[in-house]
Image: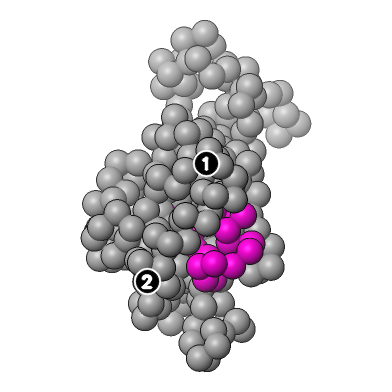
Amino acid sequence: MPGLTLGDVVPNLELDTTHGTIRLHEFVGDAYTIIFSHPADFTPVCTTELSEMASYTSEFEKRGVKLLGFSCDDVESHKEWIKDIEAYKPGRHVTFPIVADPDRTAIRQLNMIDADEKDTAGGELPNRALHIVGPDKKVKLSFLFPACAGRNIAEVLRATDALMTAANWVPGDRVVIPPGVSDEKAKERFPSGFETAQLPSGKCYLRFADVE
């Protein structure tokens, strides 16, 4: 059975977290949400990466973006691990929930299982996956890293901004107007006007506007 991929609706799982029990669709609500998995608690790369994610939390909050971590250990283990994460770089606080998934039910359904790595008992481990989920509960973007390599959270933030504006967008850039938006609608959305690139095809599909 194919795993969860771009354009799929995430399952509405009931999850135990460090913030109590949640339903995934209700947690996402009307916001963009970043869900990200970690192989295990009390491991070096995961600890440094969670610390980095904590340092970016305010930037995601400014954008109305929610964060939800996953690990296959239990809630009490997560709570003890958070103490280490916050002690590693004092001043950084883990304010987002971390899901407990000791039976690996959630990570299987979210396509976050590592094909090769096993725990000491031979059980499945999460890979280092990250899905950006839209308000429609669909996967908009996914990253997948091996267990030995931590994610670049600055790139996660940039990718989130791009999804919420236009492809390859970085702050300060103009946005690309999607082909499905008519010139009339574009004029309403961008009253200061927009630029249409003159291309050999003569087709007026590449339009740019300043963010207002």
The reply to whether callout 1 and callout 2 are in contact (CB within 8 Å) is no
Residue hosting label 2: 74
Q: Does the segment drawn in magenta span residue 137?
A: no
In depth, the one of 198 and 210 nearer the eye is 210
Q: Position of residue 28 (x, y in %)?
A: 32, 49
Which residue, as the protein is rendered here, is positioned at the far top? 192
Residue 182 badge: none
Q: Position of residue 52 (x, y in %)?
A: 59, 47
Question: Residue at the location (47% across, 43% down)?
Answer: 93
Residue hosting label 1: 92
Tag 1: amino acid: Arg
- Residue 139 placement: quadrant: bottom left
In this rendering, position of residue 38 left or right of residue 18: right
Tag 2: amino acid: Asp
Question: Residue at the location (64% across, 69% down)?
Answer: 147
Secondary structure found at label 2: loop
Q: Answer whether residue 87 is visible to the viewer in this image.
A: yes
- Residue 11 placement: quadrant: bottom left
Question: Residue at the location (52% across, 56% down)?
Answer: 84
Secondary structure found at label 1: loop
N-terminal-most mark, 1 or 2:
2
Point out the image quarter for the N terminus: bottom left
Q: Position of residue 14 (x, y in %)?
A: 25, 65
Bounds of the magenta segment: 35-50
Q: Does the segment drawn in magenta span residue 40?
A: yes
In depth, the one of 54 and 202 nearer the eye is 54
Q: How is the image coloured?
A: one colour
